[in-house]
Image: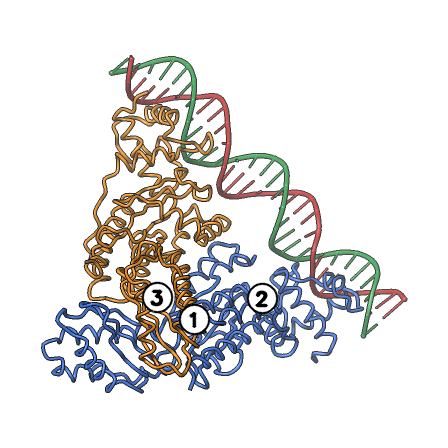
Chain colours: A orange, B blue, C green, D red
Amino acid sequence: MRLDERKVRILQAIIDDFISTAEPVGSRTIARKYNLGVSSATIRNEMSDLEEMGYLEQPHTSAGRIPSDKAYRFYVDRLMKVKSLKKEETENIKQLYRNKISQIEQVICNTAKILSDITNYTSIVLAPQMNSIVIKHIQLVPIDNRLALLVIVTNAGILKDTVVKIPEDIDADYLNRISNILNKLYKNKSFGQVNLDDLAGVRKEFARNSSLLDTLIDALSDNYSKADKDIYYGGTTNIFNFPEYQDVVRAKSFLNLLEEKELLYKLLSNVESDGVTVSIGTENPYEELRECSIVSATYKIGDRVLGSIGIIGPTRMEYSKAISAMDYMAKTLSYYLTSLYGK
Amino acid sequence: MRLDERKVRILQAIIDDFISTAEPVGSRTIARKYNLGVSSATIRNEMSDLEEMGYLEQPHTSAGRIPSDKAYRFYVDRLMKVKSLKKEETENIKQLYRNKISQIEQVICNTAKILSDITNYTSIVLAPQMNSIVIKHIQLVPIDNRLALLVIVTNAGILKDTVVKIPEDIDADYLNRISNILNKLYKNKSFGQVNLDDLAGVRKEFARNSSLLDTLIDALSDNYSKADKDIYYGGTTNIFNFPEYQDVVRAKSFLNLLEEKELLYKLLSNVESDGVTVSIGTENPYEELRECSIVSATYKIGDRVLGSIGIIGPTRMEYSKAISAMDYMAKTLSYYLTSLYGK
DNA sequence: TTTAGCACTCAATGGCTTAGAGTGCTAACA
DNA sequence: TGTTAGCACTCTAAGCCATTGAGTGCTAAA
């Protein structure tokens, strides 16, 4: 059976309607709301065909029909016109980056927030992936006679800097010497190449202060291992706005899903490095996500991918809005980061 | 009418039962489960008295009874024995602070998490209140020829340090001079005393680099104004575990409540500075909280209150557990911060 | 003062009916 | 041959009603 133009028009009407109402769509509704110039009976026949072709599903005989994942895919690839963001929305985004220069985590956290504000879905942002980040400089900055700040400067902005306790009798010169040792070992290496054993190897240079060495090893490995899977969220409670999540059990399982960092991490780190990726319902590799869609993109410094951003919502998603917001956001963030830290 | 010993025993049984089941408690249940040596009819009479005295309420005639806020207050003040935490729980808490020295925000964020893990309620932690924090040192640390790190060292650990853009032609000496100016102006002042006009007043010293000055003013005011109302959460979805929040509307309104930072901020900043404060249902000044209880305490460095911690849950809360966890946590956190930044 | 007994109340449960939205088929029509 | 009106059929959701049972309050006896 061929998907002729009339079928396409009807399919589009059904998808549009279902996206906005979340109710199964009947033939009469289509005939009334979208005047396609044919009667409900004709539409009924076409709908029956569309079901046979796999684009529609029927929850039960006496209900209307809902689009299948295949229909959404067709919609996203062919039907939908990506409408650009409203002026005020792009302004909001730009505003976020204008003048504001602060910790990269801050920026990313705000990115998540604004993305969920614009789309009304939940947004997920993966913090920069350490493995690809190169250390430009390590320095111990003295704070007082018992504390110092271990600052790791990377080509993606400052990383979590860490306060470390130092033995009381250590002076600035000594800290400088240690900074030099650290630099010699790690400068221009990526975090993936960092080997903490190297540091243990120079234990003798620390003389009697081997406890300081241990503290440093701790601090470094902390930064290395943990920050890697940092995930930021925006609009986690937005899910309650959707009728399909008015059921506590479903809402809860959605919120639990968000806490499965491992899964989200895998999901978002396998994203195309260019443009916006859309993953619909059962296209997702994970069971838990078979009723959700994910719109994602990466953000970069120059050409190097740092991390990724995702929007997650019901398969009945306003793809057009979500995709355009994602596209604009990822580009703006990348542009901003590149101008700040890029070479 | 007097609250004689038998009434108290019955009241206690009812409260205990309701706390663990969330179901209205009937006279027969009490007679069966807690053998008080009297029949259900006697208990019935006593319950009727307790209701008249305001300790019990009846959702409807043919249901059992539930404790009133007055009953919980009595329970917390007189009846309840605070049971101390399990060994493994205190171990978990200590573990959190052992060796781990990092940004104060990190510590606070983890505090929220562990508190909610132990109690199964939602925890709320107010970041250190800037007004009382004293600046010990301000320094601009050069990163590369376009960026510097503005580090503000306080008597409560490092504050959010900020990356600032600097004009390309500025050298380390110049940054040092600026650091000195900043120190002269702000050292040993609390954030409450910081007046950004002071900085504007030295504009001439910046010579042609007045854009750098503006950046610094921005960065400082950012730290000053925003961080002040930072709130960290733990276990926000724990609320779904309680039968009284199986209703989406209620669950949603609870989650919305958590986003009312202004309100939570007011609520938690008016807490007794010593010991644990318990605020039950309608005792709370806000309408939205009349079905919740809040257990809170402050954390300090030495004697100076920095911020506060709260646990929020249904009025039917396991007060004993919540209070002991809160007590232990606040003390441990204060001890840790004092040993690190105190004096 | 305590307790057994009993009538009474009321939310919750489950079965039953009805209403209505929607389908699919058939037959007539252009 | 494609389109449409008409109609019987299906199935969920909503409303209604009777039943159940947990729990109370009162009374009278121990």
Whole-percent x and y of residue A31?
A: 31, 31
Q: Secondary structure at mark 2?
A: loop
Three-letter residue code for mark 2: Arg
Whole-percent x and y of residue A213?
A: 42, 71
Work out whether mark 1 precedes mark 3 in sequence or the reverse, and give the earlier one.
3
Q: Are marks 1 and 3 in contact (CB under 8 Å)?
A: no
Q: Secondary structure at mark 3?
A: loop
Q: Are marks 3 and 2 in contact (CB under 8 Å)?
A: no
Are tags 1 and 2 found on a single chain? no
Neighbour tally class for label 1: few under 14, some 14-19, many 20 plus, Cα within 10 Å: some
User: Along the horizontal axis of the image, is C5 left or right of B228?
Assistant: right
Would you name the residue on which mark 2 appears?
A: B316
Q: Spatial distance from mark 3 to mark 2, Cα to Cα?
A: 40 Å
Above or below residue B281? Residue A273 is: above
Among the 4 quarters of the image, the one containing residue A208: bottom left
Whole-percent x and y of residue C2?
A: 82, 70
Query: In this rendering, which labeled residue sits more in front, label 1 or label 3?
Result: 1
Q: Residue at x 13, y 83 (%)?
A: B205
Above or below residue B331? Residue A23 is: above
Would you name the residue on which mark 1 appears?
A: A215
Subunit bearing disc 3: A
Whole-percent x and y of residue A118?
A: 29, 54
User: Along the horizontal axis of the image, is A228 left or right of C10?
Assistant: left
Mark linked to residue B334:
none
Would you name the residue on which mark 3 appears?
A: A160
Q: Residue at x 41, y 83 (%)?
A: A168
Between residues B69 and B196, which one lies in front from this camera angle? B196
